[in-house]
Amino acid sequence: MKKIQLYIIIFLGVFQSAWSQDLKRANDLFEKKYYADAIALYEAALPSNKSSLIIKNLADSYYHTFDLNASARWYRYLISNYGDTVDEQYYFKLNQSLKAIGEYEEANNFLIDYYTKEGNVAQLQQLKEAIVYLENVSAIGERFAIENSKLNTTTSEFGAMQVNNALWYTATHKKSTSKTYRWNNQHYLDIYTHAIDQVQLGDSLSISLSNHVNTKLHEGSFTISPNGTTMYFTRNNYNNGKRKTDDQKVSNLKIYSANLVDGEWKNITELSFNSDDFSNEHPALNAAGTKLYFSSDRPGGFGSFDLYEVSLLSDNTFSTPVNLGSVINTDKKEQFPFLASDNSLYFSSNGHPGFGLLDVFISKNKNGTFQHPDNLGLPVNSGYDDFSYVLNTDNTSGYFASNRPSGVGSDDIYSFNITQELVIEDCEQFITGIITDRTTTLALANATVTLLNAENEIIATFITKENGAFNFDIVCEALYEVQVEKKGFEGNTKNIRSTKERNAELDASMDLYSIQEKQKAEALVLQQKQEAEKLRLEQLAIKKMEADKKALALAEQRSAEKAERLEKERIAKKSKTEKALVKKIEDAIRTEEALVKETDRTIIQTEEIHFDYSLWYLRRESRERLQTVIDIMKKNPGIIIEIGTHTDIRGNGGYNKNLSQKRADSAKDYLVKNGIESERIVSKGYGESKPIVVCGTEKDCTEEDHEWNRRCEFVVVGWDYGK
């Protein structure tokens, strides 16, 4: 077991040591700018180490070898994981990588987010202006017809220029045995010449310009004096077979001159303003041959490579290099200058607003001063490097180079013809319309139409003519308000938002309402409302009457139904009660001997109740006889009786009537005193009106007859007292 552990420790130590050596070697290669070789070692290190340094160097290596998909991927990763420690240059490189692969919106958003986070208001505003500027350039469309040259191969060709009947250009060594440039693992560059009428036959007919000019290191980017006897070209720091480097082991670029002697380029001379510590490159002469322009990363510039000029003095020396200033140079790269016959400066830059990486720009020369540069536009410029732009003597055709993926490979030469002038205009739209009378629909003259911006500031004013038409020029993607006024009319307003569509017309036609017509209309509307309200109320009244009528009918129906039901219930109850009462009466009559049912009435039969003549007081025997009545009424508490007393015909009729009433009341009082409710007793004196024995005169009847007529009867008049 101890041996196994020892082997593991030894193995891990060896592995760790090997990995550390590979990473050190990758970093050494990166520092020497051997990017193509460094990539494989960094990729191998990724599974175990994704430090910010490794990701930066890997992304940069892909960036410098133009694998922009890969560089975009790793710059994204770098910013996502180490964003707080990453400086602006990596956001810029991600922006350039994304532009190269066509992701323009994402590219701009990364920089917008960065400048916003940093609070860099000036850079943010500059970026937004650049975005709009490039939209304006794109709107021109394709202003060049371009063609990929037959001289191109899978390696680099660029810097083409027509010299007499030949096309001179820079390309990698044509011999496969030549030395490899480890930046991109291609061969070093030389200057070649090719008969202009044989370009279509391909690069196999190209020949090296001169063995004095071309060496085993880089040569390229040349310019020829107007008389054709002097050329200036770029070469590594190499002369007389010796290569020199700076303290970083980098062989910087220098500018050399050569003279045409007996048809050969000789007298290779390093220019005086070169240095071993920085690069000078891409020489270009003005049309007069009096000034030399070049690119350099010398100290004191604005950043990276700047453009400079020197004057060619009469003694074949050069003045001190002068930086072309901040109008031309940025903190990024400005390279590949070219001076046209009108002294316009063409150059490539990734610091001015561009479509990605190096774009070609033009700076016109006005009274000896270079003006603010403009992007040359599409399709010369692309998302990749576009450079070494050169015009032919006709100033309408020429050559440029690009490493865009649609080419043969690496840097390719393209020929071009200018098909359209470079006119960069802001996106513009038009607000148009006609002002009309809302009532008559006729056009209104002398209406004041005012255009205001989003800040409510007046931009322009227009007075309509007889046709009522108006128009305004506006910028794209902005918010406007159009106001219209005219005496005697109500004003009107319309909001307009412009879009990206160039030269589009946005309709803001409006009608105005005559105040007089409005008042008429309002009066009519008020009248109509009042009439409508009146009609509504009438209809509501009718509906209410109908509803009330229906409700009344329904109530009457329900009342009738209820009355009918109650009547039926009453009748049924009465019938039931009557039946019960009849039974009760029948039971009472059957059980009470004193209750006697006669033909049309029921009476309580007692022994005769007599009163003394002309008196109404009850006799003793009469009171005893009334006990029968008291007993029956107590046994049958529902019985109601009428005490009817009668007299004979003797005496005055009125007297007899009054006497009989007193006798009836006397009997009632006696019954009440003996516990019978007063309400159950009706006392009524009939006088001589209902005799049993009818006597014509007193003498017609016997005393017995008169006694029969003087009587007291107890007639049952009700059986349901208290019900």
Image: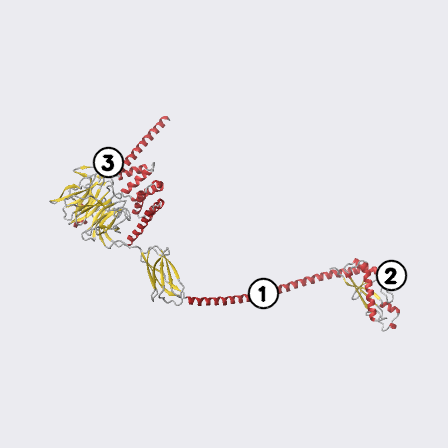
Q: Crowdedness of circle 1 by 10 Å Cα count: few (<14), some, many (20+)?
A: some
Q: Looking at the image, which residue sits at the far left?
A: 262
Residues at marks 3 and 1, CA–CA distance in whole angstroms? 114 Å
Q: Quadrant of the N terminus?
A: top left
**Amino acid at circle 1:** Asp
Task: Tell me if residue 709 can be seen.
Answer: yes
Q: Position of residue 484 (x, y in %)?
A: 37, 62
In the displayed structure, 62 sits above or below 598; it is: above
Q: Is tag 3's residue or tag 2's residue first in the polypeptide sequence?
A: 3
**Amino acid at circle 2:** Glu
Would residue 671 appear left or right of 446 to someone viewing this image?
right
Residue 654 badge: none
Task: Tell me if residue 691 can be seen.
Answer: no
Tag 2, which secondary structure? helix
Would residue 559 appear left or right of 479 to someone viewing this image?
right
Task: Name the residue beneath numbered marker 2.
Answer: 621
Q: Position of residue 309 (x, y in %)?
A: 21, 46
> Do the residues bearing badges 1 and 2 touch, measured as CB atoms within 8 Å?
no
Residues at marks 1 and 2, CA–CA distance in whole angstroms? 72 Å
Task: Name the residue beneath numbered marker 3.
Answer: 247
Would residue 211 appear left or right of 381 to someone viewing this image?
left
Tag 1, which secondary structure? helix
Task: Name the residue beneath numbered marker 1.
Answer: 548
Would residue 206 appear left or right of 479 to someone viewing this image?
left
Q: Position of residue 708 (x, y in %)?
A: 85, 67
Of residues 554 and 491, the one nearer the viewer is: 491
Q: Nearer the viewer, mark 3 or mark 2?
A: 3
Q: Quadrant of residue 672?
A: bottom right
**Amino acid at circle 3:** Asp
Of residues 33 and 84, the one nearer the viewer is: 84
Q: Is tag 1's residue or tag 2's residue first in the polypeptide sequence?
A: 1
